[in-house]
Amino acid sequence: MINEFLKYNAFDIPVKQREKIFLKEINQLTNYHYNNCLEYKKILNLLNFNVRKNYSLEQIPFTPTRLFKHFDLISSKKKTVYKTLRSSGTTDSNVSRIYLDRKNVNNQIKVLSKIVSNFLGKERLPMLIIDSKRQVENPNNLTAKNAAIRGFSIFGKNYEYLLNDSNEIDYEKLNKFLFNFGKKKFLVFGFTIDIFQFLINEIDPKKLNLNFKNSILLHGGGWKKLESKKIKNDLFKKKLLDKLKINKIFNYYGMVEQTGSIFVECNCGKFISSIFSDIIIRDEKLKKVKKGNKGLIQLLSVLPTSYPGHSILTEDIGEILDEDGCIKCKLHGKSFIVHGRAEQSEVRGCSDV
C-alpha cells in the first residue's frame, strides 16, 4: 500500500484522517512479517499474537531495537537482499543488521524525498559533506552513518567533503567550494557529533574566504555523545550561529532500523511525524502514556517490508507535545521531543526467544 501514501504530501493530512489507512497497513505488515520471518513469529507467539485479529495501534507488537543485534530478522528471501546496513558499534557483535531488498531501498528513497523536500525545497543544492570522501565512498562501509550520507545525497549536487583522508579539515577544498557556491543557498550535511567536532570546535573562521550564512544545515544522530559535554540543542545552534553565521538548522531523528522514515525538526524545534510514520510513548511498564509525559519511544513505519522493523521500541526517552503537529509551521503530524537515552538502556522481556 506504500503507493497510496506516496500520493500525498508528507505533512498535509491531519492525524485523525490518516489513522485508518495507517493502522490497516501496520496490521498487514505485522501479519506479513509473522508469516515470513521465523524469528519474528517466535517473538509474537510468545505474546499470544492472533493473526486473525485487527489490533489497535497501541496493541501492535513492537520489537526492541536490541534484538536486531542478536538475531537475523529478515522477511525477504536471502537471495533478494540488496543491502545489509549496520548500526554503529564498537565490535561486530554489537551492531544491528538490517536486510534490505531493492524494493525496500527504492521506497526508502521515495519517502525520504517526500519528507525532506518540505524543509529543503525540491531544488538540489551544492552539498558540503562533513566527512571524508574515502570513508563515504568505501563500498564495504555500510554503516548507518554512511547510509545516511548516501541517502541524503539525493538532495545535493556539486558534492564536496570537508575532511581529507587524514580526517583533517581541507581548507583549500572548502574555500574553493565556498567561492563557487557560498554566495547562494547551499546544503551542509553531517552527523551531529561530526558537526560539533569540526564546525564548532575545530574550524578556524579566519582561514575561510566566506562564512556559512547562506547554508542550510541538516544533521542527525550522535546526540548521546554530546550528553556528557552538556551540549543541548539550543546551545548547539547558538555556537553554529556565532561562529559560522549558520541560522537555518534542521535536526532529524531516525535510526537504521527504520531508515527512510525519519522525523525532521520544524522551525519551532519539534519533531513532526509524517504520514509514513507514527510514535507512541510508553512508561517503564510499557504502557502507553498521554501527551506531556516522558517515556520510551516506540516508532511505527509503513516502510520496512524486507524485515520486521515496522514497529520498534527504541532505547530513547521522548515526550509527545501535540497530537497533530505544529500550527505555526503548518505541518500535520504528532509533534514530540527527544530527551536522550534511557539510563542503562536495555529493554527486557524477549531474552528467552
Image: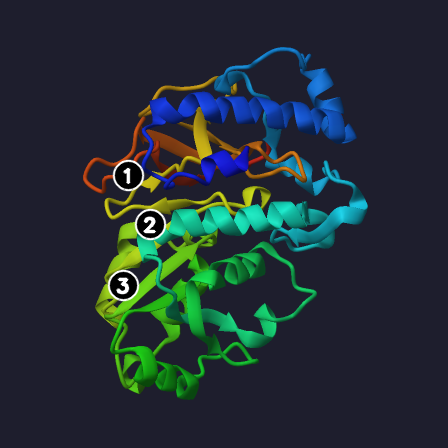
Regarding residue 243, the answer to whether it shows in the image is: yes
Instruction: Tell me which numbered mark, 2 or 3, is placed earlier along the sequence.
Output: 2
Where's residue 244, x and y in %?
A: 26, 71
Residue 118 - label = 2
Residue at 30% in and 29% down: 324
Q: Are marks 1 and 2 in contact (CB under 8 Å)?
A: yes
- Residue at horizontal 72 percent and vertical 53 percent from the top: 92
Q: Secondary structure at mark 3?
A: helix
Numbered badge on residue 77:
none
- Residue 350 vs residue 335, the one in the foreground: 335
- The quadrant of the picture occupied by the N terminus is top right
Instruction: Answer left or right for 141 relative to 300.
Output: right
Closer-to-camera residue (84/330): 330
Percent coordinates x, y for residue 45 in the rendering: 73, 17
Give, as a three-letter code, the residue at label 1. Leu
At a point 27% along the width and 52% down the height, the residue shown is: 234
Q: Along the polypeptide, which appears first: circle 1 or circle 3?
A: 3
Q: Position of residue 153 (x, y in %)?
A: 48, 64
Instruction: Name the disc covering residue 239, or none.
Output: 3
1 and 3 marks in contact (CB < 8 Å): no
For discs 2 and 3, the disc positioned in front in the rendered view: 2
**Cα–Cα span, label 2 and label 3:** 25 Å
Q: Secondary structure at mark 1?
A: loop
- Quarter assignment of residue 43: top right
Q: Is residue 24 left or right of residue 203?
A: right
* Quadrant housing residue 128: bottom left
Q: What is the spatial separation of the Cα atoms under label 1 and label 2, in whole angstroms?
A: 9 Å
